[in-house]
Image (cartoon, coloured by chain):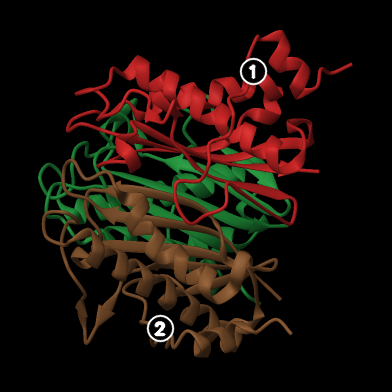
Chain colours: A green, B red, C brown
Amino acid sequence: MVPTPTEQLAAHRIELPVPPLPAGTYAPVVVHDGVAYVSGQVVVENGAVVSPGLVDRDVAPEAARAVARRAALQGLSAVGAALGSIDRIRRIVRVTVYVASSPGFVRQHEVANGATEVLVDIFGENGRPARAAVGVAGLPLNAPVEVELWAAVD
Amino acid sequence: MVPTPTEQLAAHRIELPVPPLPAGTYAPVVVHDGVAYVSGQVVVENGAVVSPGLVDRDVAPEAARAVARRAALQGLSAVGAALGSIDRIRRIVRVTVYVASSPGFVRQHEVANGATEVLVDIFGENGRPARAAVGVAGLPLNAPVEVELWAAVD
Amino acid sequence: MVPTPTEQLAAHRIELPVPPLPAGTYAPVVVHDGVAYVSGQVVVENGAVVSPGLVDRDVAPEAARAVARRAALQGLSAVGAALGSIDRIRRIVRVTVYVASSPGFVRQHEVANGATEVLVDIFGENGRPARAAVGVAGLPLNAPVEVELWAAVD
């Protein structure tokens, strides 16, 4: 028997964070035609962004990678809240990882791995998405990383 | 009777701008499988970009928010031109708001609200999209904001 | 008879590059519900990024345009590798061109034309996509351009 995503969470001792409330006029998740489009996730804890600033100047790349992982988990949590369970996810289709980058930082792909590795942990090869990783000038609330993901769902 | 999007435009005294011509080799809108993918919109008036420059250094955030609103309306106008009417829009699925950001500007989400609030005015909850808001280093023609939207259509 | 994409490649003397291996935890292409989502492409040759740096400061815009063209061809090559042939592509639906931009560079749309013009050469009007072109702070491996494309496929 292939373990379900929920079983994989338990096996990897991963706890999904509470999905954050939208910080503006948008929906956390829109489901259309079998795809759940999740809004860009920044990681907030107790009302404050975790590891604020530009990666490489203010935030170490390894810390940014950990934020990317949590942002991906927040995205899954948002899908679970919208659909009742992450077990309705069939495939992670696509992920964009925006990394707030100090001048000269060019390892956005390593930060982005933090997001996509945990998706493969949970969904196996169905969690390996198409991906874009880019370095941006700044992100809402001074977040170091924003992760957007789309999932094919039942 | 739920008012149509066209009726909501009139009720809110919103006039859709003329859709701009593409500034390069691309289509204003591609419709595939029930989704209208609208190219990124920058706001041009009389041949010149409105409020050029980086937000917070050259352009006040409130002015950028107004540009984001107009860019969203341009996007709707492009869908209307492609399909005959914006009344064929069923759902705004997803919006990305790119904000040309001066160093340290981290309120891209507030600028992005300019785009998504007017969509909710026109389409109600069907206008509340999944969204990403990010700060970029620069945009075509020195635009302060670029808005990309996708709409589910009949 | 309309020439096939493969015939158009020959007519335009275009050779598709070998698709690069993923530089991280992602899939080169995910096909879902008739759309091939191609991961963001940066151009690597003999293990090194071509024309590294920020456009306008380190890389001339014309050189960046040539990189954008090659990145688009790499994307097609990835689709061909995933599906057996680029002749299964029916429509280029959408392209995002991320341009690593030095401060003040605002001609991302001209760089982006390098990607979309070659798509029109190969697929005719079916190769003219919806497009977003934006200037970013930096890209993986110091690439000057990253191109993401999605194609409707048989």
Residue A134: image x %, image y %? Answer: 31, 55
Query: Mark 2 and mark 1: span between their CA atoms?
Result: 45 Å
Q: Quadrant of residue A26?
A: top right
Image point 24% across, 83% down: which residue?
Answer: C45
Q: Choose between A105 and A20: the one closer to the eye.
A: A105
* Residue ID for mark 2: C19
Q: Chain of mark 1?
A: B
Amino acid type of the residue tagged 2 in the rendering: Pro
- In the rendered structure, find residue B121 and report the number of the disc placed on it: 1
C7 is higher (above) or lower (below) than C28: below
SS assignment at label 1? helix
Q: Chain of mark 2?
A: C
Q: Is residue B83 or residue A34 the one in the foreground?
A: B83
Q: Residue A77 or A61: which is nearer the viewer?
A: A61
Is A140 positioned to the left or the right of A77 in the image? left
Residue A116 visible in the shown view: no
Q: Identity of the amino acid at label 1? A: Asp
Residue A79 in view, yes or no: yes
Q: Is residue A121 above or below residue C8?
A: above
- Label 2: how many residues lie within 10 Å, few (<14), some (14-19) or many (20+)? many
* Mark 1 closeness class: few <14, some 14–19, many ≥20 residues within 10 Å: some
Residue A149 locus on image (x, y percent): 50, 52
Task: Pinpoint residue A22: horizontal percent, then vertical percent.
Answer: 49, 29
Location of the C terminus of chain C (image quadrant): bottom right
Q: Residue at x 62, y 23 (%)?
A: B16
> Outermost residue toward the front?
B46
Residue at 42% in and 88% down: C15
